[in-house]
Amino acid sequence: MTSARSPKGQPRPDFLARFLSAVPLLAIYFGLAALYAWQASRRPVPTIFTDELELTQLARSIAETGEPARRGEPYGLATLVAYALAPVWWLGSATASWAAAKLVLVLAMTATIFPAYGLARMVVPKWPALAAAGASVAVPALAYSPILVEEPLAYPISTLALWMIARALERPTWGRFAVAAAVSILGALVRTQLAVLLAVLVLGALWLAWQSEPARRWRMTWTRWDWIGAVTLTIGVAFALAAAMGNASTAWRNTMVAYKDRIFEHASWAFGALAIGVGVLPVLLGLAALARPRGEPRDPRTRAFVTTSVAGLTVFVAYAGIKGAYNSTVFSTLIVERNLIYLTPILFIATALAISRGVGRGWAIAGAALFTLYVVTATPLRLDQYPYYEAHGLSIAAFANRELGWSEGTIEGALVAVCVAALVVAVALKLLKPRSVGFAWIAGTAAVAVVAWGMTGQVYAAEGERLFSERIDQNLPKPYDWVDEATRGASVVVLGQQISDPTGIWLTEFFNPSVRKIWSLDGTAIKVGSPILTPDLDAIDGTLEPVPGTAYALAVNGVRLQAPVVAQRENAVLYRIDGGPLQLEDALIGRETDGWMVGTSGEPGVARASYTRYDVSEDEPGLAVVELSRNSWCPSKALRQVGKATVRIGPVGIGPDNQPRIEQVTQTKMFDLPDCTGNGTSLQPPSVPWRMEITVEPTFVPKDVDPSKSDNRRLGARIIRADFQPLFGD
């Protein structure tokens, strides 16, 4: 019996032969996926907030209603990752859903190996393609795989889009361009940054048209003035597009005009972190390989891959530079390697191309070596931050510092040595015959070293994320879903104040889907993400409005309600309110979670706090008591200062902003509060709902007084006590 034949007359592999040929690829996929799934299982709680919380809210809403929303508020267009994760929240248990979500993302991100292999097979044989595809998922970026963010799905979609773009440029047809555009749009729906894939497609198509035979013949007729006009027109179009972008986006305008000098710096840092993470050699060798050797036969596949790679490198690096520069103006100075991880498959495939079919031209090797050395040495290592979420490529430097005890200078010297070694490898591969023993030995050793380097970085980055997660987990009440257990899934509103560290609230909301709303008495719930609400005082008996409409209320950080207590964990008390209004028993506002009163940006020299007692129905004769302390702040005698505390008391009133105030001051007391000591006072409260207002001035910044301190808040005093003390109490 003869086997079936293809239209070209070649034997068509049967199913078994195809399966056996795919076994190595599947083995690498499942082996790495198993490793990453195990890493995911050791990460007990989410840590990247508010990203992971917001994605979870969207996915839960889609699972429940089919529409994305955050805390019941419609969201609009959500990332496709939320839709992909929605089914896991049908499992019921938040803990089970969390485990399933991590596994889904691990499997998705590791699946990058398949489109990477397809892209590699366009230019190199099976085994080098297999090595390049496997290396693409054995890098520090895979530490993102168990994190509930967009990268785990964006990474494989981006690689698939690059493959489809290369295929479209290899043999241009309307169908192939439509597929490439569709996958690129799909990438943008997963992560908005991936809209740049459309720019890669457009640039590739323009270059293809420019290099076409009709365009060549047309250019041959140009005069010098034609060339000058073409260049002028191109520059004019570029400026027009930049102006249009500036009119459409304030962020773009501010970055490109006011801070354009930072774009190159941030692009260099991002690329340097990527180079360090992948082992340096794939950047040097991969970039050099894009300049194909003279005399190499013109191959549509190689041309398409090189065009896609150059366009991808240009667009992604430009985006990273602009994104990093913009972040530095509105948020923080970051190394945004996270925005460049999508170039990793291109670099590894280009490296495989160099080893399989020639390294490239001499000038390209020299240029790539200088570029690689520059970006690697220019990149800050951020050894003080581990894990460094924005640039997991730097985890190998953290490993050398924390596990091997190397200093920053030693690590920088080692990275320079690695750059030199990479250049030596590139030159050796250029000079040696491709099929010689020396060539095979150098190429094999370099490949093993690069993969070992990348996996070490991945494992250490994932270990850092695990340790960070465990540190947070240590301070959480157990079980995680204690609110859901107590309410049997009925709706809950969280009410807090002075939420300076919202991690506990975030995770309570994450593991307890019954938490539907987050409110705060002083507006600080804005730090917990949105949407939020600051309720108004409706009556001096502590009644708030609007009515939350939930069955329960979870009061945190010192807030107490006039309602039956259902359950309690440390600084959180669950009350049953049966859909009625919230009614405060009392409220201490202005004390952060560590006890300190802190000055605000609007009034930095004064720290303010207040204690309001709404329920006085069962109060015995007693006093309003305030105890403040600076015992935990004790600098040297020459640096000590004395704070002045003022306490006022009077009946509760409602101000024009519908917030509580003292209607009429009935008593005022002042006292000194020197550093290293504590002090306090007592006042006579009215017989109606009353309020104390406490001020401490001047404030001080620990970091300014003692540079060894990291606290840069403007501190007044720690509130040890501010409440009501019965005269005949225990």
Image: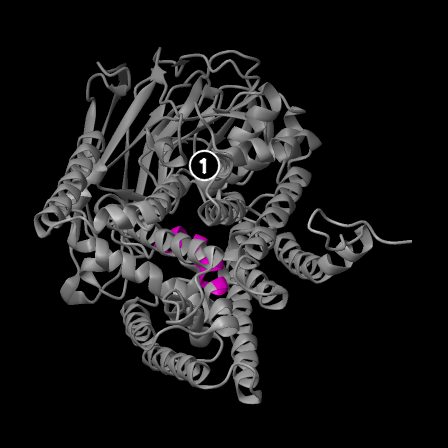
Q: Is residue 320 magenta?
A: no
The quadrant where residue 559 appears: top left
Question: Is 260 on the left or on the right of 660, as rendered?
Answer: left
How would you classify the magenta stretch by its main secondary structure?
Answer: helix
The quadrant where residue 514 appears: top right
Residue neighbourhood size for the residue with mark 1, other residues' Cα within 10 Å, grouped as few (<14), some (14–19), many (≥20): many
- Pick the residue in front: 274 or 465: 274
- Pick the residue in front: 271 or 48: 271
Residue found at the very far right of the displayed protein: 1
The quadrant where residue 359 appears: bottom left
Q: Secondary structure at mark 1?
A: helix
Is residue 380 positioned above or below 585 on the image? Answer: below
User: Is residue 282 at least partly visible in the picture?
Assistant: yes
Is residue 384 positioned above or below 211 on the image? Answer: below
Picture coordinates of residue 672 (x, y %)? 18, 47
Is residue 378 positioned above or below 586 on the image? Answer: below
Give the residue type at disc 1.
Ala
Q: For the magenta stretch, what is the residue range?
A: 336-349
Is residue 658 positioned above or below 177 on the image? Answer: above
Write the residue at 40% across / 71% down: 295
Name the residue carrying label 1.
181
Q: How many marks?
A: 1
Picture coordinates of residue 703 (x, y %)? 23, 59
Write the residue at 32% across / 42% down: 627
Question: Is 695 on the left or on the right of 133, as rendered?
Answer: left
Write the residue at 39% across / 64% down: 290
Picture coordinates of residue 260 (x, y %)? 16, 50
Picture coordinates of residue 272 (x, y %)? 34, 65
Write the residue at 32% across / 28% down: 522
Question: Is 669 on the left or on the right of 109, as rendered?
Answer: left
Q: Is residue 344 magenta?
A: yes
- Pick the residue in front: 289 or 488: 289
